[in-house]
Image (spheres, grey):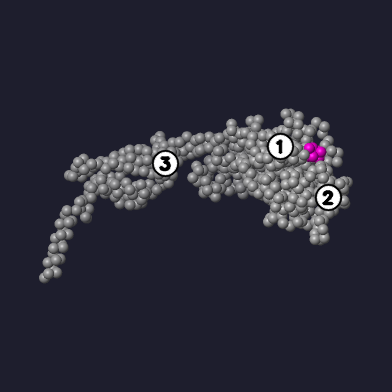
């Protein structure tokens, strides 16, 4: 009896509490809807729509429309707000209310924001009366009335151009002829016609067939096949004489210096899937062109510009949002295009590299690599066989050499001398007694010995050692300096340190571990051993000798702020530096100097040659040799050139390189 009474009381209380609880309000329901909307929970939003709305659109269509539009316009920072009305503004008996709300979002076309009223209606449900949203497409965008499609179109910016110091184009915008085929106009001898076109365009038949079989192709459509240089007028005339072949003028990148500056400028090409994934938040699309190498890649973010976008209602003139394109930035670099070409011509297709710099300002005047490729061919389209020929070539024409590291050979000797003088381990006037062509420290070296080229002088001071490029002298000097001080001295010259320069430069290295091994230490003294140095770094290091012992900081871009600064200050004392500069003049002007021939009376230069031996052991007779020459004019210094040519063995070693550098310096300085 007592249990029944308690149950009855509980039931009465439950009824009373239910009667007293507040029914949901329109404000509550719209607040809940807005929270779901801000969280883009479209499926749950649909559950809160009115019955009449649900009759007009299915849940599947509602969700897919929101998702499709929001994804298509790249919605970010979605924010919907609603000011809840005060209690005294509410009508308890109303079955329909109208509330204002505001929406803002970021899209590919910029910010979109609008204000609108929404109708909220009261409906009877199983659980009593409730409020629901009377939805319309205009709540997505006010421009929508029904089932219209929202589209996004892009407007490509104009890519910024690259100019040399004299405002001559290195990478410029122009026009190309795009050759295409209208499939429906192909004659009956279709296969023979395609073969003819493929031959004329240096393409494989399969490449053309693949383009003609793309899913979007229709018989009457123009199908782009390949771009050609507008200067190829004869080829153009032959092509358009073929039935079905047409041409269109299209914007195209052009590299006026072609092969001579290919590794400097690089080229642009279609974005890859991997690049698109990496750059998807930076305005790129599957149709974008990006810098693939060289300056095009280095300055990509500034050259590309900003794509413009228009969000519109298809089939109408209704614009939802639009953002005009922003053209890329033009960039001027310190490169002298004509000097670049002169150095490239001197390399004459051989494997090698050259770097030129203004030694007093740090302006980088040329960055040359050979053999090379024509970057314009990447724009006009390389066949797979043409690309394979480049990528598989044993001399690696696609690889830039000026920023890679090599054994510097004897071109390092002035730096070793600087370190010795700084450390107080070298008296430039003191003579070392060196006899014969070979030397080893003692019996502990076993069969290992150091070899020099000439034994013309047995009493060798620093000047003599540089003039004759005496390996034994510098091997002994390295031992006198010691491993720790030599390593520290090389680091003072920038070894094992990244170079602050827009173009990536491989860091120069001293050894795989350290120089504690005496034989390795001795070999390092004349630029062999495990020492590796980039031609670019070597060029910068030699600026020390015309800057009173300070190494210039190279720069590449012409800007209002560009000014001379030093990478390493006071590496050597002025008097030390003067000694070395005087001795380097002797290397070129003394008849016994390794850089004497050919004598050019009009040139006042200092420099150093180097022949780096690339072999597995001292006994290796098959190893190749790289020839180096670094030279700077000393009368009002304006030009410092480093050139390295690979495989100069049996061709005079470094002597093969000297006349090439002198000829370029003669041409350049005579025009200054």
Whole-number angstrom distance, CA of label 1 to CA of label 3: 57 Å
Residue beneath disc 2: 452
Name the foreground residue: 219 vs 203: 203
For image coordinates 43% across by 44% down, the residue present is 74
Label 1, secondary structure: give it.
loop
Whole-number angstrom distance, CA of label 1 to CA of label 2: 31 Å
What kind of secondary structure does the magenta stretch mostly adopt? helix
Which labelled disc corresponds to residue 548? Answer: 1
For image coordinates 69% across by 42% down, the residue present is 571
Task: Say whether disc 1 or disc 2 marks the residue closer to the N-terminus.
Answer: 2
Name the foreground residue: 306 vs 381: 306
Tell me the mark number nearer the camera, choosing from 1 and 3.
1
Task: Say whether disc 3 or disc 2 marks the residue closer to the N-terminus.
Answer: 3
Q: Classify residue 467 by image quadrant.
A: top right
Name the foreground residue: 613 vs 279: 613
Segment tinted magenta in the rendering: 582-588
Residue beneath disc 3: 106
């Amino acid at each position: 009896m007592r249990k029944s009474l308690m149950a009855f009381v509980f039931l009465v209380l439950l009824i009373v509490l239910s009667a007293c609880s507040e029914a949901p309000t329109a404000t509550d329901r719209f607040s809940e809807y807005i929270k779901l909307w801000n969280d883009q929970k479209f499926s749950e939003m649909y559950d809160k729509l009115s019955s009449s709305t649900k009759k007009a659109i299915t849940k599947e269509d509602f969700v897919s429309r929101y998702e499709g539009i929001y994804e298509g316009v790249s919605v970010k920072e979605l924010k919907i707000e609603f000011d809840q009305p005060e209690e005294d503004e509410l009508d308890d008996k109303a079955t329909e209310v109208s509330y204002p709300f505001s929406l803002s979002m970021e899209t590919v076309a910029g910010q979109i924001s609008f204000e609108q009223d929404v109708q909220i209606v009261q409906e009877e449900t199983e659980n009593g009366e409730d409020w629901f949203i009377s939805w319309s497409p205009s709540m997505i965008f006010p421009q929508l009335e029904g089932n219209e499609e929202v589209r996004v179109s892009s407007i490509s910016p104009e890519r910024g151009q690259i100019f040399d110091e004299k405002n001559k184009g290195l990478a410029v915008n122009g026009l190309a002829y795009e050759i295409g085929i209208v499939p429906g106009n192909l004659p009956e001898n279709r296969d023979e016609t395609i073969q003819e076109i493929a031959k004329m365009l240096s393409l494989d038949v399969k490449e053309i067939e693949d383009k003609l079989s793309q899913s979007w192709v229709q018989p009457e459509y123009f199908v782009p096949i390949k771009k050609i240089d507008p200067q190829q007028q004869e080829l153009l005339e032959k092509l358009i004489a073929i039935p079905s072949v047409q041409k269109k003028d299209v914007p195209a990148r052009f590299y006026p210096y072609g092969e001579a500056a290919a590794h400097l400028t690089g080229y642009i090409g279609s974005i890859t899937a991997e690049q698109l994934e990496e750059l998807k938040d930076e305005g790129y699309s599957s149709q974008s062109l990006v810098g693939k190498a060289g300056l095009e890649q280095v300055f990509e973010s500034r050259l590309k510009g900003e794509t413009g976008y228009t969000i519109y209602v298809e089939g109408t003139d209704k614009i939802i949002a639009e953002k005009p394109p922003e053209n890329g930035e033009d960039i001027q670099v310190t490169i002298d295009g004509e000097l670049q070409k002169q150095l490239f011509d001197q390399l004459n297709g051989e494997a090698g590299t050259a770097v030129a710099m203004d030694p007093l300002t740090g302006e980088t005047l040329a960055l040359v690599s050979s053999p090379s490729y024509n970057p314009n061919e990447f724009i006009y389209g390389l066949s797979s066989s043409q690309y394979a020929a480049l990528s598989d070539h044993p001399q690696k024409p696609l690889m830039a050499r000026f920023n890679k590291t090599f054994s510097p050979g004897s071109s390092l000797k002035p730096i070793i001398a600087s370190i010795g003088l700084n450390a107080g381990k070298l008296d430039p006037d003191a003579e070392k007694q060196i006899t014969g062509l070979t030397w080893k420290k003692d019996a502990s070296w076993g069969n290992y010995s150091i070899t020099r080229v000439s034994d013309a002088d047995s009493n060798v001071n620093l000047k003599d050692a540089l003039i004759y490029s005496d390996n034994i002298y510098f091997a002994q000097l390295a031992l006198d300096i010691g491993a720790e001080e030599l390593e520290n001295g090389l680091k003072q010259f920038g070894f094992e340190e990244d170079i602050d320069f827009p173009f990536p430069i491989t860091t120069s290295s001293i050894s795989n571990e350290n120089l504690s091994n005496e034989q390795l230490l001795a070999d390092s003294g004349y630029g062999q051993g495990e020492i590796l140095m980039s031609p670019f770094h070597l060029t910068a290091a030699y600026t020390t000798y015309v800057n009173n012992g300070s190494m210039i900081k190279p720069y590449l871009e012409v800007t209002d702020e560009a000014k001379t600064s030093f990478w390493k200050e006071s590496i050597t004392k002025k008097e030390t530096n003067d000694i070395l500069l005087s001795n380097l003049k002797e290397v070129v002007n003394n008849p016994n100097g390794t850089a004497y021939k050919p004598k050019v009376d009009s040139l006042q230069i200092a420099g150093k040659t180097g022949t780096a031996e690339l072999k597995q052991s001292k006994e290796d007779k098959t190893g190749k040799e790289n020839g180096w020459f670094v030279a700077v004019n000393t009368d009002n210094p304006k030009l410092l050139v480093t050139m390295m040519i690979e495989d100069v063995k049996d061709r005079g070693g470094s002597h093969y390189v000297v006349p090439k550098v002198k000829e370029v310096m003669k041409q350049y300085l005579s025009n200054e």
